Structures are given as structure tokens and as C-alpha cells.
Image (cartoon, grey):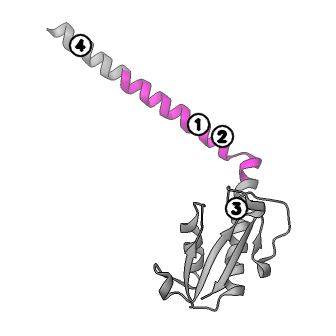
Amino acid sequence: MQVGKRMVSAAIVAAAALGLGLIVHHDVQFTSSVRTAKYAAHVNAQLQQEECVYQAIRLNVPKGATVYTTLPRFQPTQRLAELSTLWAVPVANIADAQYQLTFVAPHGRVVPFPLTTAAPDPAKGQCSGLTLKVRKL
């Protein structure tokens, strides 16, 4: 009976040690990947794109206006709502909105964030691969 308990305890300790080792290994790999210049450049490009979208909202929507954010076929509707919150008031119902905001991907692409080297133009709503379409309701 004692031998069985010790074997079970040893198996539990071994499984815990293996799990801990895998976690540490994954953390080291992840930390190494986020310390590269390529990763920093990608994050910087995303931040610049978001700043451009925010400026496009400011240039095309009056401060405090109610906006309805839509993003057909794309996932980052939540991000558009968050960016518009800094300047406008997002609403859940289009009937309550003064403006409708929609991201349009370039050339009919399905992927919404293809970062490009094209110069951003917030006045036209063009932000490094995304176009912000603003429609007055």
C-alpha cells in the first residue's frame, strides 16, 4: 500500500515538474519573440494605424456626436468602438446614431488590417491599409 501511494505521489510531482518546465520554456520563447526589432516595428505600425483612425474620426465626426460602428465581415468592430469613444458617443442602435462608422478593407480583402507602406491620410480616412467610411445618418 505504501509503495502505491509513493508511486502516485511521484507521478504527481513529475507531472507538476514537467508542466512547470513547459511553462518556463514557453515564457522564455515568448519573451524572446517580443524583444525583436520585427515585433517592435509591427506593434509600432499598429499603433500608428490606430492613431490615424482616431484622427480620421476627429476630422470627420463632430465632437460628442452619436456613432454606430459597423464592420461587415471583419472582427475589429470593438476596436473601432473603443477608438470612437475618445471623441464621439457609440450607441448600440443605429436609429439612435447621427453617424455610421465602418472600416473598409482595401481591394476587397477579407483581412482587415493589412498594414501597408502607403502614407496615411486621416482626412480621407485612409490609414495604412484601412479606410474609415463615415456616413451621416
Task: Choose top left, top right, bottom left or bottom right for residue 87.
Answer: bottom right
Q: Nearer the viewer, residue 8 or 42?
A: 42
Labels 4 & 3 near each other (Cβ < 8 A)? no
Q: Dividing the image into 4 quarters, which one contains the N terminus?
A: top left
Q: Which mark is residue 46?
A: 3
Query: Which numbered disc flags the more N-terminal residue, 2 or 4?
Result: 4
Query: Which numbered disc flags the more N-terminal residue, 3 or 1?
Result: 1
Task: Choose top left, top right, bottom left or bottom right for residue 114.
Answer: bottom right
Q: Which mark is residue 76?
A: none
Q: Please state which amino acid type lies under the numbered disc 1.
A: Val
Q: Dividing the image into 4 quarters, which one contains the C terminus?
A: bottom right
Labels 2 & 4 near each other (Cβ < 8 A)? no
Q: Position of residue 47 (x, y in %)?
A: 69, 65
| In this picture, residue 93 sits left or right of residue 117 | left
Mark-to-mark CA distance, 4 and 3 = 53 Å
Q: Position of residue 132 (x, y in %)?
A: 70, 74
What residue is disc 4 on?
Answer: 6
What stretch of residues is rendered in magenta? 15-40
Labels 3 & 1 near each other (Cβ < 8 A)? no
Query: Which numbered disc flags the more N-terminal residue, 4 or 3?
Result: 4
What residue is disc 2 on?
Answer: 32
Q: Please state which amino acid type lies under the numbered disc 2.
A: Ser
Q: Main secondary structure of the magenta part?
A: helix
Q: Please state which amino acid type lies under the numbered disc 4.
A: Arg
